[in-house]
Each structure stands twice: as structure tokens, then as C-alpha cells.
Image: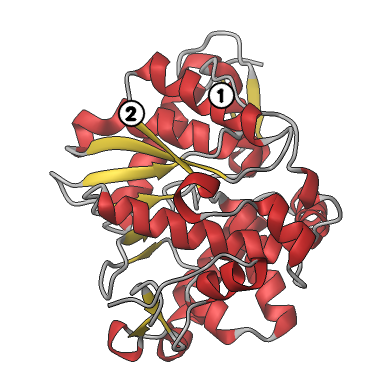
Amino acid sequence: MKCRACGGEAAVRLEYANLQLCREDFLRFFERRVARTIKRYRMLPRGAKVVVALSGGKDSSALLHVLWRLRSALGVEVEALTVDLGIGGYSELYVGAARALCARLGVPLRVVSLESEYGFTVDDVARRVRRAVCSACGTIKRYVLNREARRAGGYALATGHNLDDTLAAVLQAYVRGDVGALSKLGPALPPGGGFVARVKPLIETPEGDVRLYAEYAGIEYVRVKCPYSRGATSYTYKAALDLLEREHPGIKFQMLRSFLDRLQPALAGARPSAEQLDKCTVCGEPSRSPVCQFCRIRRQIGVRLREHG
């Protein structure tokens, strides 16, 4: 195979685009697509500070790397934020990977210990809370990442959700009939009501391309999965999406475009506005109930809480 861009030997073939590229041209192709995604959805105004939620996995590590590469062209400041969730035998791996990557790139990194800052760990949740660990962990991460990104003066929190992640989440929400979740699954949510902006620069990038970018860019990332993620239904949805893509190359992009252009606008009314949110009486963070889910989890574990004053 010959590289479509330079005529040299191709390293990868992208079936969905009928395109062969060498390593260097693939890296450029990947970065140009991320830049176009950011501009298309107006994710990051010039001069903004973007805080990358860095989990040490391939997606968030690739995202940090590409934003670091694009920072001058986009006119943004890049920082990283890692939450040490206190998962025995796992947190040490991804926190170490996050520190190593940020040291290599020269990107400021803040590591927030859930145990030190908030008084509990995800291992505590697994032992004491009657709720699926992944669901509770998702609530915890969203809370801590937003709060700490805001404290850091960030305009936006950038997450590594890729095309496959997004479509799997759309399918899961559809099966549950969760209209509220569907309304929030777009590429960007604006700041307001105590929330920083939330952006997904990889939303138009297939997971396989992210893996290739990490490999070709020499990014070291954690390859083992969280011990609590075994049996997660998202893997099944992704396998179904991969089957569709093999039979119909490009269908993932078609599904995303149909969802964003046709379905999500009709669901906009289901998304709670900042005016509809109150403040948690315990922590003062935005909440749809008197006590937010994060504080309810802490109470179930036995953390002593003081009313917000």
C-alpha cells in the first residue's frame, strides 16, 4: 500500500475513508480532525484554559497529547487533572502513567486524592454502598472533575470520550429510555450554574484511530482495565457497533451525524438548564435535589458531613 498523502509506504488503512496513510501522515490526519472538531463545535475560545481529565488510559492520554500539540494553533492553555480514586492495585498504575506523560510534555498536572480530599475511596464504595460500582464511580468522577477544574480556573473540562464511547452511551440511554442522558450526549456543553464547559474533542474519532495515534506518537498508557469494569455492558454495545462497521464501513459516522443533527435538537428541552438546578445543602455544588448524589454516597459510606453555610 502507498500513502495517499506522500506516496511512501503506508502503515494503516482507514476503511471508513478508503484511505491509506504512513505513520507521519496519519498523525497529521488525526490532529487535523481533532482541530476541525474543536472549531466546528466552538469548544474552546482563544485564550481559554482547558483542563484535561487524565485517567492514564489511551483516550485521555492521546487527548492530552493532541491538545498539547495544537495549543498554539488553538490559542489555549492546557493543564491536566487526575483523580486518584483509591482503587487498590489500579490507581497507582494510572496515576503513575499520568505523571510520566505530563512530565514528558511539560504539562502542569494536579492529582486529587479522593481519600485525602473527600474522605473515602472507590474501594469503600464497593464495600459499603448498595449501588453498581461503575455507576457510583461515574457520579464521583463527574463531581470531582468539575469542582476541581473550576477551582483551577478552567474554562472547560476536556474528556477523552471518542466516537465509539459516544455511540455506546447513546444506545445504552436509548434502551433505558433516558431522555435526559440523551440530551447531554453532544460534543460540548456550555459553562454555567457552577459547571465549567464540558467538551469532547475526540467525539468524531473512532476508538481504533485513538489507539493507533497513541502507538505512533509513542504515548505510554495503562493497558489494564479497571477491576470494577468487568462485565460492563458498554463492551457489548461497542462489539455490536464494530460488527456494523465491518459490514458497513462509515456507519458509525453516519449514526453520530444523524444523532447530533436530527435527534438531539428535538431533545434539547429535556436538558436541565442552570436555572432549574439548586445548590446542595451539604457541599454547595449544583444539584437537582436538596442533597446531591455525591454527598449521598459519602453519607452511605459514613463520612461525617457538615452543612454548607
Q: Which quadrant of the view contains residue 124? A: bottom right
| Residue 168 seen in render | yes
Q: Are marks 1 and 2 in contact (CB under 8 Å)?
A: no
Up the image or down, 285 lies above or below 198; here it is: below
Quadrant occupied by the N terminus:
top right
Tag 1: amino acid: Gly
Q: How many marks?
A: 2
For this orientation, the residue located farthest to the right is: 231
Q: Which residue is mark 2?
A: 68
Residue 28 in the image: x percent, y percent? 41, 25
Q: Residue at x 41, y 48 (%)?
A: 201
Task: Compute the Cα span from label 1 to label 2.
Answer: 19 Å
Is residue 35 shown left or right of residue 91? left
Sort mark 1 into few (<14), some (14-19) or many (20+) by Cα contacts within 10 Å. few
The residue type indicated by label 2 comes to Trp
Q: According to the image, label 1 marks what residue?
A: 96
